[in-house]
Image: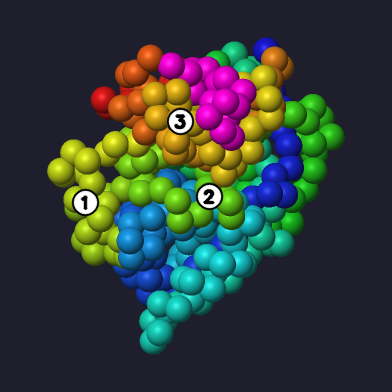
Amino acid sequence: MSATVSSLPGLAVLRACGAQAADLLHAQLTQGLRDLPAEAARPAALCSPQGRMLADFTIWRDGADGFALALDASLAEAMLKRLRMFILRLQCRLDDASAERPCWGLLLRGDAASPVALPLQPWALCRDRGLCVVRLPDAPGVQRALLVAEDDDGRATAARLQQTLPAADDWALQAVRCGVAQLSASTSAQFVPQMVNFELIGGIDFKKGCYPGQEVVARTEYRGSVKRRLHRITAHDPLQPGDALFHDSDPGQPCGMVVNAAPAADGWEALAEIKTALLAHAGALHLGRADGPVLQLATLPYPVPD
C-alpha cells in the first residue's frame, strides 16, 4: 500500500475573478456555477455552437470572487482567448494562473494514509497548508486527488511531499482507468459531451439554461440519440489521442477515436469514443486502419447506458 505524488506540468490553470466572474462562466460552460459551494469542484466543458466540446475543465472557487479552471495545457491559450471574447462589459478578468497555481497529482493505493487532508467524496475539496486538495473520481483500488498550490506555503508543502513520497509513473494510466475523458489539442471539437460520457460524471447541468451548443446537447440527451459512447480499450501497440479506430463490420470508415491514452504494464490503455451499435456485431476493433492491430474492450468503473 503506497502514496505517490507527481508534478503535473501538462495541466494548466486559468483564473476568472471579479464581481461577475460567475456570470461569465455560467453563461459559457455546461456546468451551473452561480451556486457552486466553496467546498466543491465540478467538471465542466466549453462547447462550440455546434455542441462539440472544445475543452473540459475541473472548476472550483478560488478566493471570494474567483474561480480556478484546470485543463490540458495544450488548450489553455485557445480557451483563454475564447472565453475573453465574452467578457465584454462584465466586471471580470481572466488570466492564465498556471505559474501561480502549480499542480501535483496524488495517488493512494489500498488503505494508504493520505499525507494531506483528503475529502471523502469525488468532486469535493478542502485546503491544507496552502494546498487546494480536489478529490477526483477514483480508479479501481486507487484514490486520486489534484493538489494545487495557492501560495508560498502550498508550494513548500508540495516540495516536502515530493521529498518524502515516491513519484508516480502511472498518473495518466489511473486517469484512463477512472473513466473520465480529458481533451487535448488533438481531440478538441470532436465530441458532443455525451459521446465521452460527460453527463454520466456530472459534467452537464441540464437545468441551468443557455450556453453555446446547449440546444445540441439537450437534443442529444432528450431524444435519446447518443449513438457513440466512451469505452476503455487495451492494446499491445502504442495509443495516442486522435488515433482512429475501425471495426470489422464496417471497415470502410472509422468507428471511433482515442481520447486519452497511457502506457500500462503489459501494453497500452485508452479511453476511446466508439460507435456503440458496432460493438454488438461480430468482429474485432482495430487501431488506425481496417487491418490494424486488434484492440480489446475493457470495463469502466461506472455503467454506460445502451
Q: Secondary structure at mark 3?
A: loop
Contact between marks 2 and 1 (CB within 8 A): the answer is no
Q: CA distance from mark 1 to mark 3?
A: 31 Å
Which residue is denoted by mark 3 in the rendering? 251
Q: CA distance from mark 3 to mark 2?
A: 22 Å
Q: Secondary structure at mark 1?
A: helix
If you read the primary sequence from the N terminus, does the residue marked by circle 1 or circle 3 appear first? 1
Viewer-nearest residue: 170 or 68: 170
| Point 33% across, 61% down: residue | 50
Tell me which segment is drawn in magenta: 283-298
Viewer-nearest residue: 70 or 213: 213
The image position of residue 74, as x and y in percent, is 63, 56
| Point 48% across, 18% down: residue | 284
Which residue is denoted by mark 1 in the rendering? 218
Kindly identify which numbered label has been placed on residue 89: none
Viewer-nearest residue: 8 or 293: 293
Amino acid type, label 3: Pro
The image position of residue 60, as x and y in percent, is 47, 53
If you read the primary sequence from the N terminus, does the residue marked by circle 2 or circle 1 appear first? 2
Which residue is denoted by mark 2 in the rendering? 187
In which quadrant of the rendered image does the C terminus lie?
top left
